[in-house]
Amino acid sequence: MSQANPPEPGCIFCKIVAGQIPAKVVYQDDEIVVFPDINPAAPVHLLMVPREHVENLMTAQARHQALLGRMLGLAPRLAREQGAADGFRIVINNGPDGGQEVYHLHVHVLGGPRPWKRL
Ligand code: 5GP
Ligand code: ZN
């Protein structure tokens, strides 16, 4: 069984997970932390991150499959609670050509009344 990755020095989402950078956490459990995007592209724009530093889906391991499933499973409830009752979009950017800016896996949850920007 492989070990969890350690926090990555300089990773902004590791720092949010550790409470070293402030964020308005709207949900957290032993594996997942959720907070609003600092530059929202929709009325509701949440970022769901694993506590463990995983770069993206390209480097995720088989042991992360249940975690990834749990993140997607949580999205409808959090979207509804945060004001996106009529639907939402899930975006996961991966690597340079995927437009990824922060290299700590995160699920964008975008919703709320239209119109809003596309990612
Ligand atoms: P990516 O392009 O990597 O999928 O998305 C990174 C997202 O992280 C961007 O939407 C950006 O606004 C958001 N972000 C970057 N730095 C911070 C931060 O310090 N706090 C929060 N809440 N969001 C951040
Ligand atoms: Zn990280």
Image (spheres, rainbow, N blue to C red):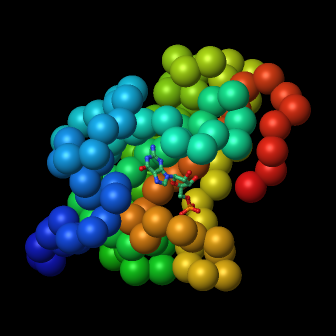
Residue 105 visible in the picture: yes
Residue at x 80% of width, y 50% of height: 118
Residue 17 visible in the picture: no
Q: Is residue 91 above or below residue 26?
A: below
Residue at x 60% of width, y 66% of height: 93
Who is closer to the viewer here, 38 or 6? 38
Quarter of the figure with the N terminus: bottom left
Residue at x 37% of width, y 29% of height: 24
Residue at x 12% of width, y 73% of height: 3
The answer to whether residue 52 is left or right of residue 41 is: left
The answer to whether residue 98 is left or right of residue 102 is: right
Who is closer to the viewer here, 11 or 89? 11
Q: Residue furthest right?
A: 115
Q: Is residue 43 above or below residue 116?
A: above
User: Based on the displayed image, in which of its 4 quarters is residue 59 positioned?
Assistant: bottom left
| Count of numbered marks | 0
Quarter of the figure with the C terminus: bottom right
Q: Is residue 21 above or below residue 115?
A: below
The answer to whether residue 63 is left or right of residue 34 is: left
User: Based on the displayed image, in which of its 4 quarters is residue 39 positioned?
Assistant: top right
Who is closer to the viewer here, 45 or 107? 45
Instruction: Report x, y in % for residue 14.
Output: 26, 57
Q: Is residue 2 above or below residue 91?
A: below
Instruction: Report x, y in % for residue 45.
Output: 60, 37
The answer to whether residue 20 is left or right of residue 81 is: left
Instruction: Report x, y in % for residue 86.
Output: 75, 22
Instruction: Report x, y in % for residue 115.
Output: 87, 32
